[in-house]
Amino acid sequence: MTALGLWNIASALSFLNSSSVIHGNISKNSIFLSSSGEWKLFGLEFTCSSPSQLTSSPSSHFFPPELSSASRPDLDGLPIHCIDSWMFAMFLNSIFNPESSNFVKGAIPTTLYNQIRGLVIKDAKSRKSIKDVIIDAKAGWWWDNEPVRIALELNEMSIVGKDRGDEILRKLQPLLSTTTFADEYKTFKILPNLLSALEFGGFINALPVVLEIAKELQKSEFDKVVWPCLARLFGNQDRQVRRMLLDYMETIISLLTKFGDGKESKVVVDVVWNNISVGFSDPSPIIREATLKSILSIIPKLNDRIINTDLLKYLAKLQVDEEPGIRTNTTICLGKLAKHLNEPTRKKVLVPAFTRALKDPFPPSRNAGLLAISATVEFLDIVEITQRLIPHVSVLLIDTEKNIRTLAFKCIDGLIKTVEKHAKDMPETANLPPQSTTTGQSAATKATSPASTTDGWSSWTATKLTESIMGKPKPVVSPTDSGKTSSQGDTVKSSVDYGTRSSVEQQVSEKKVESGWDTLENGWEEETDDLFDDTATTKPLQTNNSVSLSKPGTGGGGMKLTSQKESLFLDDAFETSSRTSTSSSVTNLMETDTFFGDVKGGVVEEKSAIEIDRERRRAKLAEMKEARKAARLGAKKI
């Protein structure tokens, strides 16, 4: 800063002399420091316009020989600059050689010494002016000092060309991290010049330098000097300005956090977000992409409404952008954004967004989708992983790009491990709701009550249910009785005891609850009518695909049906029949190999059996219709 201070003093003296003014009081006592650390020339109380008018001053020990001699020759004919030139050289000598009262080289740099020694020529008329020294300095000591040259050029940034200004900024930025410039000089001298060039001179490249200096400011200085300028820049519609602000968004947000005192979120929403959000739909792809990248820096300062609503609307549009790079960066952004979303929004957004990326024809976009899935697996629902993500990721296992295939294997391996971990914590079986005992108790009550012993509609329902499933079994007759059966038309009693009513009624009640039907009667009428349709062609049941019977206790498991719904009722009815064992015809049926054809102990003609069965079914149908009608009339009377 000494070199720069000497330059400032020399410049001030040159200006005074060019205006025909003699300072005449140059010494350390006439130099003051400004708030920026710059040297300022004071002591103007002894200024005059002619050497003859200068008789004395506090710096008289620096007077030239012509003023210190007793004869004092004619001074009016001397140049104006002669006195200040001599005094400036002696002042400079006192800085480099404080112990010497005479002008000597000493510690004065050689280049500087060669430039200023013409100021101490004893012949006043031959003495060089300070202006000449300044002109020579542009090829000498001062100009060889890069900090001085940069500081001097910085004062003229508003009038230099853009290329020259950018070069100055490139040289200035590395010096800011050193002790070349005092902190005060950077804050109160360099920073105002840069802000002026940034806002009014169009030097947008000055923004990084401004932000670098702003890191060392106090809060009051930042609020007063830097932030007002930045806030105005955010409202600037120039794309170059907007692009630079977006590129350095992370630094800007860190400064707002440092100096915001907890109020930075409101500032970010009101000033930053409201101005940069228009960039999502900007016609320029560069601005759209820069806006997308900057979002991650301001996410912590945005409120939930903006994050989970407004921002996601913009990202949804960008994921189908015509630029593949923007689509890729959108997927990456969503992956990093996941931790800031609320739970409902994650379930609604993440999986559809990632699966869309996996289908993108641009390989880096598919790559980004796989990376995003791997990074956010902790936020994904296990059902979504198994039903949606794993099928989509598996498609990429044979992707045309090798790196995609490799990453897909890693991704699906991570998903499988997540599912395995979840499956280990699952119960061994589903927890079925406890069955209500009300229905069973009611059925048991009906079975023991006097009303249940009558041949009412409940008895008919149990019989019809079993018949609808098993079909009407064929009568078992001996060979000697076959002729009587065909000729006399005697009805053979059924060889099956269908079990108690309580067991069947209980299962019917359970079926009613499961299906949601309104009434038991309506639920069953359709099946019984179809089953007993007289126009239907009767066909013998086949043991290989319909019903197979085996003796109880022989390992055959009783009765096997192809319909699970029918077996639910039939098994219970058959087990009840086995428990009661009140009819010997049950044993006869279990010993029967088939319903028709060969029977142990005799053979029945198939045609005669079909005709007998048809007559019996018609008679039984008429009987059941009458019983149903009677049951309905009885219910109405009750």
Image: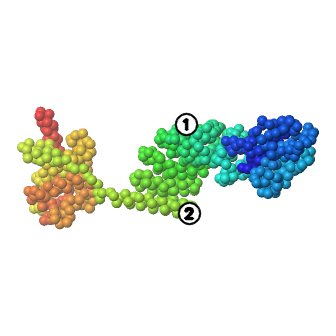
Instruction: Point out the tag, 1 or 2, that comes first from the N-terminus.
Output: 1
Query: Mark 1 falls on what kind of element?
Result: helix
Give coordinates of residue 214: x percent, y percent.
62, 45
Residue 205 as seen in the image, left or right of residue 66: left
Identified by mark 1, the residue type is Asp
- Placement of 235 over or under 323, stated as above or below: above
Label 2 crowd bin: few (<14), some (14–19), many (20+), radius 10 Å? few
Residue nearest the observer in this picture, 443 or 16: 16
Residue nearest the observer in this picture, 239 or 313: 239
Q: Mark 1 = which residue? A: 270
Residue 478 appears in which quarter of the rendering? bottom left
Identified by mark 2, the residue type is Lys
Give coordinates of residue 581: x percent, y percent.
10, 58
Visible residue check, residue 396: yes
- Quarter of the picture containing the C terminus is top left
Residue nearest the observer in this picture, 61 or 628: 61
Q: Which mark is residue 402?
A: 2
Q: Residue at x 51, y 59 (%)?
A: 396
